Image (cartoon, rainbow, N blue to C red):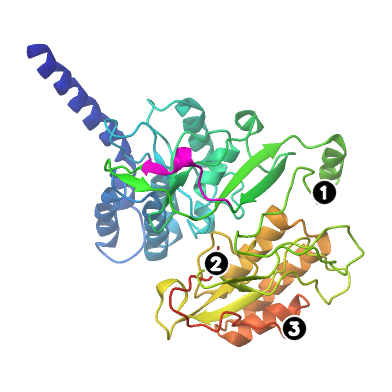
Amino acid sequence: MFSKAILLSVLAALTEARFGQEQLPISAISSAPGGQSGQAATLAGQSISFLLAAANPCDKLKQADLIVATLGDGAIPAAIGLVAAEQNFNPFVVSVPTICSDPTLPTTQALRGIVPLVDPAVTGSDLENANSAKSKTTPFDATGLSVAQVMAAQGFSNFTTKDAAGNVGAAPAAAAGGATKGNANQASSASVVASAAPASSSAAAQVDACGGAVQAAPTTLATVTKSKATKASKTKAAGGKATASAASSAAAAPATSTTAAASTGNTATTGTAGAGAVSDPVTGTFSGFVASSISGLDFGTCTPTMKFEAGLNGRAATESTFQAIDPVVNKGQQEALNPNIITNRICDQLTNVCGANAAAKTACTAAKAQISALGTRNAATADAWNTALGFAGTDTNPDKAPQTGLVGHT
């Protein structure tokens, strides 16, 4: 009995010590400059709850965004500390941490590409904690990727995932040699393979930080792997030319879709059409792959159009938001009131999964600037985007929204 009591005391002390380590960013937030009197202290007090085991890891990233939005750029170092902070978990219930799988978070550019510390008891923690320290000064490439995907791309995947809605999933596969490749901007190629299949039976039930069994959500997951660039690819990269990974493969369409082989109508490349026509009451309607009407713009396997619909994903029927139409492009992306979030996502996907040519990527960047300059948030905004990329006349409400139960993305 005496030895058992000592053991419990030691475990309690260790747990308290670890939690003390996890609280390190709080004082930095409290003393961060900017904002009105008392705001920094309030944000610091709120931030503690996001480091607890029961917290959704995506909420920690939202809090970091809020810190910068409230206090200004002077608080970015403190917000970086929160993003990189280790989140507590109950070692008596789970043996690995849970990481945010939402690719839109954090939204603050200065906070993207930063990965968190993990408990030293977790297998592979040495690698991840070294990556975390490096990312605070030299963020990894997070274009279109969630924090979970960035971690996996750097070689660590000993974790479970959770999206902003609380849906639990398995970690993406770790990239081979990720630890030695360092920043993803170096000469390597990323191959992103999206799977439309439900989670496997082995991952059917996950355990949340509170110890309860959580059924794996029937959402799709994106797996990020990295492969060595070919000699020819490295040569092109050295010359500053964009290269496409030979290992890239287009994301499969949802199971409810009908895949159709169609000609892109663009002779610049030999790329094939992406997703076929889809009509789903939850994920939405997509009429199928269409090539741009502008000569020289090859968007690969994707159709980079945007919609503007009311009532998406549980929003009020009077609230309209923007979203990409192609299910390959909008996969895992939440709808947004700000069109710039969606235009950025579309342009990211041209590189990540679509295999677009350089001209198409350049056109996308120019269209992004155009939409940002417009400053509007209505159907005409989506029309302007579609027209700029060679898809004039696209139906910006293909789902005839609002519709009950319509989420609007895969």
Occupied quadrant, residue 123? top left
Please state which amino acid type lies under the numbered disc 1. Answer: Gly
User: How many numbered marks does the figure carry?
Assistant: 3
* Label 1 CA crowd tier, 10 Å (few <14, some 14–19, many 20+): few
Q: CA distance from mark 1 to mark 2?
A: 34 Å
For label 3, the residue is 392
396 vs 371, nearest the viewer: 396
Q: Is residue 198 magenta?
A: yes
Residue extent of the magenta highlight: 197-206
For label 1, the residue is 240
Measuring from the top left, give residue 322's x and y in whole percent: 55, 75
Please state which amino acid type lies under the numbered disc 2. Answer: His
Q: Looking at the image, is mark 1 or mark 2 earlier in the sequence?
A: 1
Residue depth check, mark 1 versus mark 3: number of the one nearer the observer: 3
Q: Looking at the image, is mark 2 or mark 3 earlier in the sequence?
A: 3
* Label 3 CA crowd tier, 10 Å (few <14, some 14–19, many 20+): some
Task: Specify the quadrant that holds the C terminus.
Answer: bottom right
Occupied quadrant, residue 229? top right
Q: Is residue 196 magenta?
A: no
